[in-house]
Amino acid sequence: MLPIFNTSKSTSSKLRYRQIACLLLNHIKTHYKNIFAQNQNFRRLLNKKTLNNLQKLKEDIQAKQLALHYFSSFQLISDILTYQFEADCLADIQNLCNYLSI
């Protein structure tokens, strides 16, 4: 029974990271169209919305700065409320921000 619980928790975590990636990509496409078109990390994230690809933003200073700027903005909270994502998403974003900040 424990593996089933872990699997469903893992699945919901994957879904949250997909949601986080979608929020970030929508923001970048809307406000930074030129950067989105030029930045390989954002285009990679468009194809595979995973924690691993979100963490790869750390390797690109421009992508990292834009991600951290969005994740620390009031726009993020508004977007989360608009799309009605679960609150656990905020904890995942905080963990991701901590990772990107180091």
Image (spheres, rainbow, N blue to C red):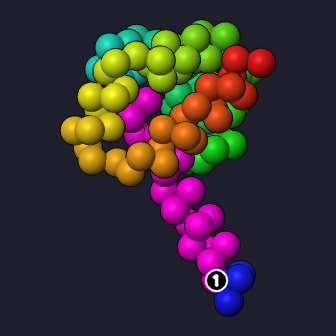
- The answer, for residue 38, to whether it is visible in the render is no
Within the image, what quadrant is residue 6 found in? bottom right
Q: Is residue 64 left or right of residue 87?
A: right
Residue 50 locus on image (x, y percent): 59, 47
Vertical relation: 92 (above or below) 64: below
Magenta span covers which residues?
A: 4-26
The quarter of the rendered structure image containing the N terminus is bottom right
Foreground: 85 or 55?
85
Residue drawn 67% across the image and 10% down it: 61
- Compared with 43, 65 (above or below) is above
Residue 18 within the magenta-colored segment of the rendering: yes
Q: Residue at x 53, y 28 (%)?
A: 42
Residue that label 1 marks: 4
What secondary structure is the stretch in magenta mostly built from? Answer: helix
Identified by mark 1, the residue type is Ile
Q: Position of residue 91 (x, y in %)?
A: 55, 40
Which percent across, then down, holds residue 16? 49, 51
Label 1 sits on a secondary structure element that is helix
Q: Could you tell me which residue is drawn at 69 percent across and 43 percent down?
A: 52
Instruction: Say whether residue 97 is left or right of residue 12.
Output: right
